[in-house]
Amino acid sequence: MSLRRLGFLSAALLTAATLSACSAEPVEADDPKPSATGTTAPSGAPGGAPDEGGLALADAIRKIPVTEEKRMGYERDSFKHWVDEDDDGCPTRQEVLLAEAVTAPEQGDRCTISGGSWLSYYDEAEVTEAKKLDIDHMVPLAEAWDSGARDWTPERREAYANDLDAERSLVAVTAKTNRSKADKDPAQWMPPAESATCNYLVDWTATKLRWDLNADETEQAALLELAEPCAASIVVYDPAT
């Protein structure tokens, strides 16, 4: 069983009714959709590790290195994804679906999934058919490529594309919102649900810091502006190895 699935055992029992708008409520540790920040803050993180208590969102955003992004040479196949990393019969997509289910689905042969329910936090939609969900890379593969992954080894890109050790590197959301997002950064796209704003900014920032990815000036400016109502939001992340 992956670390990600263990981290979601308690969260999977909560429902959409417990969500509240981040403009009115800070991101709390018991939020029904905890952010992808991890639970510890080890030393030696790329760009400087956060303190044990985490970093205020705006401070974390400023830790993301700012540089020009380059798309040249990107191919989706450069990131091998939906692998069965722990050889338990469940590829990454199914691992995420099992971990994030609000109502646990039935698991059949070869990790087929039936029944169950999920909450897509991007749009506060309850989904009862797994086939209607996409697994979104919090920082899209193309954006990761632009932001530094083009210089990684194929093995590191595969690890990024299948990152089950951080709760929000990957997230189950409605296909509609995932495809609307595509490869856009927060300067170009934000989740339609107001309640998602602060969590999304925390999750995006934590993922960039976890994987030592860059941001361009437009992205950083948008992140800082969008983060203004999220003063109580904290970012804690584990640097990827």
Image (spheres, grey):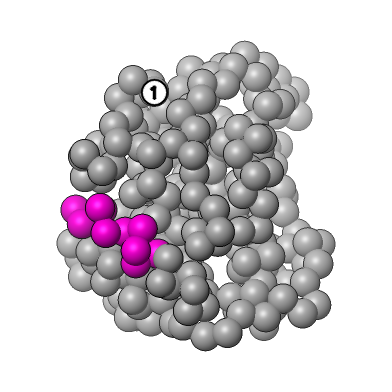
- Determine whether, in the image, residue 141 is placed left or right of residue 31: right
Position above or below: 129 against 74: above
Q: Mark 1 = which residue? A: 16
Q: In which quadrant of the rendered view does residue 140 lie? A: bottom right
Q: Residue at point 33% right, 76% down?
A: 62
At a point 21% along the width and 39% down the height, the residue shown is 24
- Residue 86 can be seen in this image: no
Which residues lie in the magenta part? 223-233
Disc 1 on helix, strand or loop? helix
Q: Main secondary structure of the magenta part?
A: loop
Left or right, residue 26 beside residue 13:
left
**Residue sitting nearer the eye, 65 or 114:** 65
Task: Decide which of 228, 121 is in the foreground and name it.
Answer: 228
Q: Write the residue at 65% across / 58% down.
A: 183
Q: Is residue 104 left or right of residue 146?
A: left
Q: Position of residue 201 (x, y in %)?
A: 39, 55
Q: Amino acid at mark 1?
A: Ala
